[in-house]
Amino acid sequence: MIEHISIETEAGTFDAIASGPEDGRPVLLLHGFPEAAIEWEHQVAVLGVNGFRAVAPDQRGYSPGVRPEQASEYTVTHLVGDVIAMADALGWGTFDLVGHDWGGAVAWWTAIDHPDRLRTLSVFSTPHPGALKTALQTDEDQRLRSQYMLDWRERSTERRMLENNAQALKQMFEWRIRPSHIDEYLQRLAGPGALTAALNWYRAGKPSGAADKIAVRTMYVWSTEDVAFGSVAAFETEKWCTGGYRFEMVEDVSHWIPEEIPEAVSSMLLEHLA
């Protein structure tokens, strides 16, 4: 059974979905752009049934209760701080962390900055930031794939994404995920300030710290049809993980791994957490 909960922090109130016993082993799942907590609906339910306490929040800018106006308040430092603040509010000393897309980037940085707080790390699609930097420096294909990250900083992006009944946002999902989820994402992002808040993740600038190697036991899952991240960064990621590493490459699956193959993702998570 999925619960809807609120997580009170100094930054504001995060909305979240949750499942499983309150005293179950805690797992925090971070969504990407332009999604929300329900990206992890299947995994939260499965983890809960298996005795974990799984929580997936709507992150900064996606939760109306934590939606600052300035792009400078969406830096990686703020986003990682939110992860730790939510864990603290939930009473979690250590926890398992899962992320996809932007949530994957936040998960990597949390493991870099707070390895003592994590039991395991699981990231879908997004390579280690050091691996991505290497790919951007050496691989023209990755530079082309990543150009959108710069383009979306332009102030015309909101208008372009929402015009024609949000056709650009709809096409982003490549018709690979549930239409009901797409409808909910679009409805949320059409709200006052919501899309600007989500895009502020891109506008906040690069992380201030250096990407270090990961000492936490890690699973990284990359799909061959990912339009954002190519194979160079994906294969490079192993070099940045020193605490035990599992790499899964899934064929003929798009960037939207957790929603396109939810059963397989849930199975991989259960195996990794075990």
Image (cartoon, grey):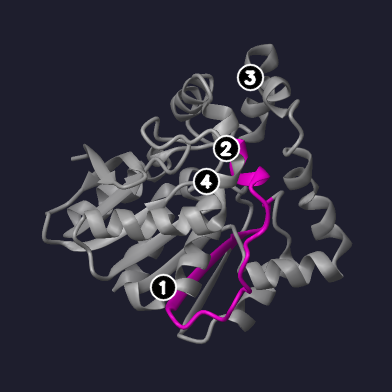
Q: Secondary structure at mark 1?
A: loop
2 or 4: tag closer to the N-terminus: 4
Q: Is residue 203 magenta?
A: yes
Q: Amino acid at mark 1?
A: His
What residue is shown at x 58% (from left), y 57% (from top)? 125
Looking at the rendered structure, which numbered label has been put on residue 225?
none
> Residue 202 at x, y = what percent?
65, 45
Residue farthest toward the right in the current orientation of the protein: 140
Q: Residue under circle 1?
A: 114
Q: Which residues are magenta?
A: 198-226
Residue 1 seen in the figure:
yes
> Residue 192 at x, y = what percent?
51, 19
Residue 256 seen in the figure:
no
Crowding around mark 2 (Cα neighbors within 10 Å: few <14, some 14 to 19, many 20+) is: few
Q: CA distance from mark 1 to mark 4?
A: 21 Å
Q: Is residue 162 magenta?
A: no
Q: Residue under circle 2?
A: 70
Looking at the rendered structure, which numbered label has been put on residue 32?
4
4 or 3: tag closer to the N-terminus: 4
